[in-house]
Each structure stands twice: as structure tokens, then as C-alpha cells.
Image (spheres, helix red, strand yellow):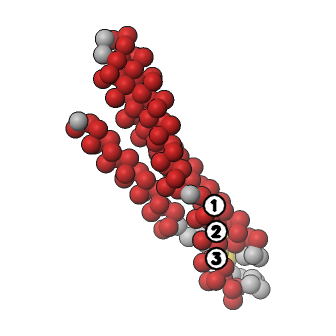
């Protein structure tokens, strides 16, 4: 039971970290010779909202955790059956797979957010440096 509680807490932390990473990042925009510089603040707000919709971080992270947990449970049960304890193997595999799947999906979601944000600003005529 203790491992299940720990796994749940770790998964929750990954989900929240995915959201926090997206909301705390802002691209660097060079306004030198930018005829659209006067619109930068409004464009950044609009693009931030569009990027958030495009990435769906919490949903992707939760999906990754579920899929990773299922795959991990199956693999863990198979290994556990060989060693004599399929239930324990499935539990360990589910926890490891869920955490790994959540982390991977959270990072991919963060990349999608950043790419969508940059693309939006570029489409609106801004020079994005990062």
C-alpha cells in the first residue's frame, strides 16, 4: 500500500510539473525593426492561450500514465510469474510504467506548447529567438 501511495504522489507531481512548465515559459522576442512591436503584449497573450489549447498537458500526461501503467503491469506480471510472484511484479511494473509514461507524455506536451507558442508569434510577424 505504501508503494501505491508514493506512486500516486509522484504521478500527481509530474502532472502538476507539466502544467507549471508550460505556464512559466515565455519565448524571447526581438523587437528591433519589428513593425508589429506595438502588438507584442496582446499577441503573446493570444498565442499563450492558443498554445495551451494545442498542448493539453494534463490530459496527455494522464493518458501516458495510464498506458504506461498498463504496459508496465503486463510486463511486471510476466516477470513476476517467472520469479514466483506475479501480483507483486504487476504492481511494481504498473508503478514504474505509469511514472515513465507520465513523464514522457508531459515532456512531449511541453514541447508542443513551446512550438505552438513560437509558431503563433512568428505567424504574427514577430522575430522569436528561442
Q: Position of residue 61 (x, y in %)?
A: 49, 49
- The secondary structure type at the circle numbered 3 is helix
Residue 46 against residue 99 in the figure, above or below: below
**Based on the displayed image, in which of its 4 quarters is residue 30 positioned?**
bottom right
**Distance of label 3 from label 1 (alpha carbons):** 12 Å
Q: Is residue 7 visible?
A: yes
Identify the residue under disc 1. 54
Classed neighbour count for the residue bearing mark 2: other residues with Cα under 10 Å, few (<14), some (14–19), many (≥20): some
Residue at horizontal 26%, vertical 36%? 3
Identify the residue under disc 3. 46
Classed neighbour count for the residue bearing mark 1: other residues with Cα under 10 Å, few (<14), some (14–19), many (≥20): some
Give the left or right position of residue 33, taking residue 93 as reference: right
Residue at horizontal 46%, vertical 42%? 65
Identify the residue under disc 2. 50
Closest to the observer, 38 or 67: 67
- The secondary structure type at the circle numbered 2 is helix
Where does the N terminus fall, quadrant-wise?
top left
**Distance of label 2 from label 3 (alpha carbons):** 6 Å
- The secondary structure type at the circle numbered 1 is helix
Residue 78 against residue 66 in the figure, above or below: above
Q: Position of residue 57 (x, y in %)?
A: 53, 56
Where does the C terminus fall, quadrant-wise?
bottom right
Q: Determine contact: label 2, label 1, CB under 8 Å.
A: yes
Disc with the residue nearer the chain's start (3 vs 1): 3
What is the count of numbered marks? Answer: 3
Give the left or right position of residue 34, taking residue 83 as reference: right
**Distance of label 2 from label 1 (alpha carbons):** 6 Å
Q: Position of residue 43 (x, y in %)?
A: 66, 79
Q: Determine contact: label 2, label 3, CB under 8 Å.
A: yes
Classed neighbour count for the residue bearing mark 3: other residues with Cα under 10 Å, few (<14), some (14–19), many (≥20): some
Closest to the observer, 51 or 63: 63
Outermost residue on the left side: it is 2
Amino acid at each position: 500500500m505504501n508503494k501505491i501511495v508514493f506512486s500516486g504522489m509522484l504521478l500527481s507531481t509530474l502532472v502538476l510539473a507539466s502544467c507549471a512548465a508550460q505556464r512559466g515559459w515565455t519565448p524571447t522576442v526581438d523587437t528591433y525593426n519589428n513593425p508589429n512591436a506595438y502588438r507584442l503584449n496582446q499577441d503573446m497573450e493570444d498565442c499563450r492561450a492558443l498554445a495551451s489549447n494545442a498542448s493539453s498537458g494534463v490530459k496527455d500526461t494522464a493518458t501516458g500514465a495510464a498506458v504506461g501503467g498498463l504496459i508496465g503491469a503486463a510486463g511486471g506480471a510476466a516477470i513476476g510469474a517467472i520469479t514466483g510472484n506475479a501480483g507483486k511484479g504487476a504492481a511494481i511494473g504498473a508503478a514504474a510504467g505509469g511514472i515513465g509514461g507520465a513523464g514522457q507524455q508531459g515532456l512531449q506536451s511541453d514541447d508542443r506548447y513551446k512550438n505552438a507558442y513560437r509558431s503563433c508569434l512568428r505567424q504574427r510577424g514577430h522575430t522569436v529567438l528561442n
